[in-house]
Image (cartoon, grey):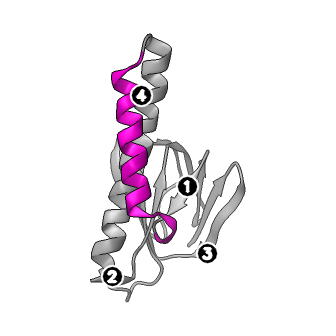
């Protein structure tokens, strides 16, 4: 099946894959070839990609997303998001510093708008940090 990960900056991934795991509003799902048609909301979280059935867990690829839309039809999985960060591109120390700054913004929010924006930043940077941790464990 084909996975297309599309962001506001363009196509991040357009490859044949065996398995995709991600979180939806209804809970986590695993998508394999032959999956039934589906349109759903992708929650902020991690997309896990297995390119070949024979790939072990050390060959998984990870992406941090802030949420978006999933469209599955005819063995094509399209994930449309504002932004996606590939695990290999995330520097763990930078993600940790960004999370700490977002937490400070959340603590100092003066109104509900600032609080909502800060909460979204906290969620995004926490997911990025989680993906960086998965990448670190994968290298071992």
Q: Is residue 61 magenta?
A: no
Marks 1/2 in contact by CB < 8 Å: the verdict is no
Q: Which mark is residue 105?
A: 4
Q: Secondary structure at mark 1?
A: strand
Q: Which mark is residue 84?
A: 1
4 vs 3, front mark: 4
Q: Position of residue 20 (x, y in %)?
A: 44, 65
Q: Position of residue 31 (x, y in %)?
A: 43, 63
What is the magenta range? 88-109
Quadrant in the rendering for residue 108: top left
CA–CA distance in space, label 2 to label 3: 23 Å
Q: Earlier in the sequence, mark 4 or mark 1?
A: 1
Quadrant assignment for the N terminus: bottom right
Evaluate whether residue 70 shows in this view.
Answer: yes
Please identify the residue farthest to the bottom as the structure is shown.
54
Q: What residue sits right under mark 3 in the picture? A: 15
Q: Secondary structure at mark 3?
A: strand
Front-most of 62 and 55?
62
Q: Position of residue 29 (x, y in %)?
A: 36, 55
Q: Earlier in the sequence, mark 1 or mark 2?
A: 1
Left/right of residue 106 with respect to residue 40 in the rendered view: left
Our reading of the magenta stretch's main secondary structure is helix
Q: Earlier in the sequence, mark 2 or mark 3?
A: 3
Q: Residue at x 44, y 64 (%)?
A: 91
């Amino acid at each position: 099946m084909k996975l297309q990960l599309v962001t506001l900056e363009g196509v991040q991934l357009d490859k044949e894959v065996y398995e995709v795991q991600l979180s939806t509003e209804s809970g986590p799902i695993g998508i394999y070839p032959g999956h039934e048609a589906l349109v759903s909301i992708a929650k902020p979280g991690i997309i896990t990609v297995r390119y070949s059935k024979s790939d072990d867990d050390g060959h998984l690829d990870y992406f941090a997303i802030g949420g978006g839309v999933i469209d599955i039809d005819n063995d094509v999985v399209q994930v449309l998001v504002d932004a996606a960060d590939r695990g290999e591109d995330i520097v763990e120390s930078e993600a940790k510093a960004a999370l700490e700054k977002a937490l400070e913004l959340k603590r100092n929010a003066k109104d509900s708008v600032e609080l909502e924006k800060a909460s979204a930043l906290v969620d995004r940077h926490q997911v990025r940090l989680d993906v960086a941790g998965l990448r670190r464990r994968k290298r071992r």
